[in-house]
Amino acid sequence: MNRYAATIGLEVHAQLKTSSKMFCSCKVEYGAEPNTHTCPTCLGLPGALPVMNGEALRLTTLAGLMLGCTIPEVCKFDRKNYYYPDMPKNYQISQYDQPLCLGGGVPLHETAYPKDAQKNITTPGKTIRLTRIHLEEDVAKSFHLESTSGIDFNRAGTPLMEIVSEADIASPEEAFAYLTALRQILIYGGISDADMEKGQMRCDVNVSVRPTDREQYGTKIELKNLNSISGVRRALAFEIDRQIEIVRAGGKLEQETRRWDDDRGETTLMRIKESAHDYRYFPDPDLLPVRTTKLVDAARVGMPELPQAKRDRFVSDYGISEYDASVLADDRELSDYFEAALRAPSSGAVGNLPKPKSVANWIINDLLSALGTSSIGLCECPIAPASIGELTLLIEGGSISGRQGKEVFAEMITSGKAPTLIVEEKGLKQVSDSGALEAFCDEVISSNPNSVADYKSGKEAALNYLKGQVMKLSKGKANPAVVGEILAKKLV
């Protein structure tokens, strides 16, 4: 039986994080009342002239630099001529033959893949090549009701970056990883919020199948209505199986556009594409070509450390595992929180800086779990980074035990108080003074001759019993490690 390979290319549209639209000063605001942020320019009224948004140009250039693109010395804007109700001036201002960014690529890292696929990555370290990134204006949003349709022009004219990949993606899991890694980079750079649920990042998928012994691509099918990264994965899994079934049965695929129905878990036909659209591009006569040298200089100033570089640095500088480094570096806000916790334990904890591994464990295992349970983001977290560092130092210095640390953390997430204050208020500080602990140990040894005899006869478990009795006598305040040392010396 023939084996089949899938060939996938993605076109991602990302709304840029600007305060105003691409060619006018109207406000960009998600969720505003319909048609409240409009003007003659974004409504396409006669005589209105576009003025370029410099911040949108800078952000697109920054995206290109972060993705390793070439930035040509000159780019220009074109009119892409077509008519839809959501573009009333009959053309969209876009870029055609001289876009802002060329080439580049998106590296796929392990944690970008779905969790159930991370142990079976076909091509580790793969990079998906990019064809280009160009800048354009978004169209209005159509609403289809029972008997009427309406259009909200608030979105019309919003700066929109189109990122076009090469057909390098070979599976639904790679498509998931590509979109996850790309979204991560856009958020890292402050380029876009890239929230698919809000339409700030949208994706069109082109997919074909072919027998593995044939080099020529199969018939390309386009998929629309993809509202989440996991939805892209599900749609591709269904569509690839559908196409393979047809080809294997001797059928012929037609070039077409299909809609993904996530509730039914299947694609359905939207329209047949017999040939490519001819949009009749020509240079926009109202907009001059742009020289990009100053844009590149401005973008380089604001270029952050890339996620992959941060992962590598966390492993080399802090000695944490690759997994921990990936979890922390995948989110820029979380990585900043981690480094702040390492740098700035509060004055209540005296000692060296906390161990990076311990801080990473508290953040990944306890903090993220608590935030998830409370359904709040890190920006709303009641625990300051310095408090995580301080809590770690209290445990490492023997002021409290690990078990007491959990109790203190629970109070921190509820009240936001500093851990040192909680320890004082609850009287949790461990007794580490050897004189006081020796008195406890002497009392326990004299009160438990049978356990002492058991220990001296080789029963190691008896020492744990004696240690427990000391902890009980001290009302849980004795330092278990110091108690163990004292008992072992006294029972020789």
Image (cartoon, rainbow, N blue to C red):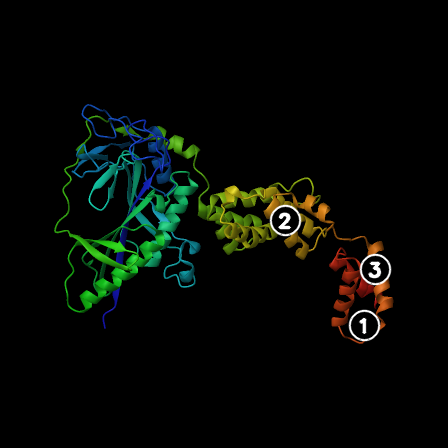
**Relative image position of residue 99 (x, y in whole percent):** 26, 37
Work out whether mark 3 precedes mark 1 in sequence or the reverse, and give the earlier one: 3
Reading the image, the residue beneath label 2 is 411
Q: Is residue 283 above or below residue 12?
A: above
Extreme residue in the bottom direction: 457
Closer to us: 216 or 471: 471
Q: CA distance from mark 3 to mark 2?
A: 30 Å
Q: Position of residue 136 (x, y in %)?
A: 27, 36
Residue type pointed to by label 2: Glu
Q: Secondary structure at mark 1?
A: helix
Q: Is residue 288 left or right of residue 377?
A: left
Q: Nearer the viewer, residue 169 or 403?
A: 403
Q: Residue at horizontal 15%, vertical 44%?
A: 277
Give the image quarter of residue 1: bottom left
How far is mark 2 from mark 1, CA to CA?
37 Å
Q: Which residue is mark 1?
A: 451
Q: Which residue is mark 3?
A: 440
On the question of residue 170 being in view, the answer is no
Image position of 141 with respect to 19: above or below: below
Marks 3/2 in contact by CB < 8 Å: the verdict is no
The answer, for residue 305, to whether it is visible in the render is yes
Indicate whether 487 appears above or below 283. Answer: below
First along the sequence among labels 3 and 2: 2
- The three-letter code of the residue at mark 3 reads Phe
